[in-house]
Amino acid sequence: RKIKATTIQFVITNVSVHTTTPKVLDVGDSVVMPGIVDCHVHVNEPGRTSWEGFWTATRAAAAGGVTTIVDMPLNSIPPTTTLSNFHEKLREATGQCFVDTAFWGGVIPSNQLELRPMIQAGVAGFKCFLIHSGVDEFPHVVDYDLHTAMKQLQGTGSVLLFHAEREVEKPTEETDPSQYSTFLQSRPDIMETEAIRIVTELCLQYQVRCHIVHLSSAKPLELIQKARQAGAPLTVETTHHYLSLCAENIPAGATQFKCCPPIRGSINREQLWSALKSGQIDMVVSDHSPCTPDLKKLDSGDFTQAWGGISSLQFGLPLFWSSASKRGFQLSDVVRLLSRKTAQLCGLDSRKGSLAPGYDADLVVWDPEREFEVKGSIHHKNKLTPYLGLSLHGVVCSTILRGRLVYRDGIFCPKPLGTHLLIPPKTNQAQL
């Protein structure tokens, strides 16, 4: 269907991306909306900068209409699990960010006394794993660690994010590791359901804000809904790959599709879309988690050995719109799910995610009708992505950060204009 927007003219400070002279940018019939807030991005710097880095990740973000990212506490070395490590992360990011950047901290065994100092220093909240994280320097937590962390977070207003998979006993039949079904069977829905059962109990017990990252299975949605009805301050996200891809279409050996939790079947995918439409799922993020090509084991096509992560930071908006527009979603839903709700999660909703007086002038100008193929101009450091060759609707024309043009028609501003976003502690943290 045809989408028409009123011709909009507005003043920005560097319309050519090379000057700071205020000029009028006429965007014609393009859509103008709040910049996207992607609150689930693995930048991997310091320590694994060959996988990604602030310079490349934030350029990819700008090219995709993302004006704010929130960096995950892993897979950098060191991980963001202590105040000292957080300060090191900030130093590494300084002068490298083309968009604004906030930071998650991490909960691991025995770091509970670091949590409140990190809150005071400005982390947006914390992430933990209930299963091996994939990297040894970010170990998963057990029940004792969870209760200890929850006690530290009570009264702070902070949020604890859960990678919600838990080990369960699985059949050990020998199968072909190059078949996607082998990997899928190794991480069944029950792993998410059992983990989310624990999360809902903790959330109700401690009344600490909890958030389930990258929900891949629709099966735990009933648990989540019951917990919310009982008063749990619980939110949940899903990702572009769970909404765009399905297990039936993943070829043998195509390890670029591997992520954890896994991409599931087409029926499950449609159930996620229904939950998104009904409000059971609050937001959509990229979970951009790249690595060097060798770690994807494309030579052997072994899903059991390949790194689990998908690169998509640059393409989230067109990925979402290409699928959502066919399912009756409107442009207002794009703003709600990709900008406003994600800003709320990380405590940025007083300045990001909306077009309103007092908010940062973060804008994305884009054409929802224009089609393009994912190829050449990929700005992530490592270009391997399951979306290569895919035709999508929704071309980002310009990205504006706090009133300054950072990206336009394939050209970036000459130097990074992004800032660090340190989240102020809530007012009830005065006693900390």
Image: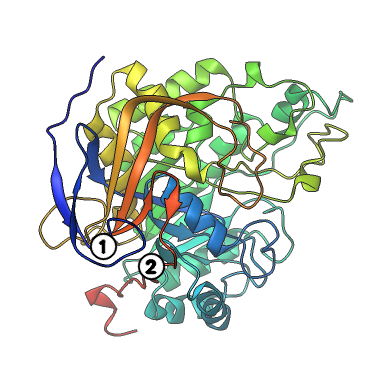
Question: Image quadrant for the N terminus?
Answer: top left
Tell me if 133 is positioned left or right of 322 in this view: right
Q: Is residue 130 above or below residue 397?
A: below
Tell me if 385 is positioned left or right of 223 in this view: right
**Residue at label 1?**
402
- Classed neighbour count for the residue bearing mark 1: other residues with Cα under 10 Å, few (<14), some (14–19), many (≥20): many
* x and y percentages locating residue 49 in the rendered image: 66, 64
* x and y percentages locating residue 294 in the rendered image: 81, 46
Label 2 SS: loop
Residue 417: give its label: 2
Give amino acid for label 1: Arg
Alpha carbon distance from label 2 to label 1: 9 Å
Residue pictured at 34% horizontal, 54% vertical: 345
Residue pictured at 79% horizontal, 23% vertical: 179
Give amino acid for label 2: Leu
Tell me if 296 is positioned left or right of 266 in this view: right
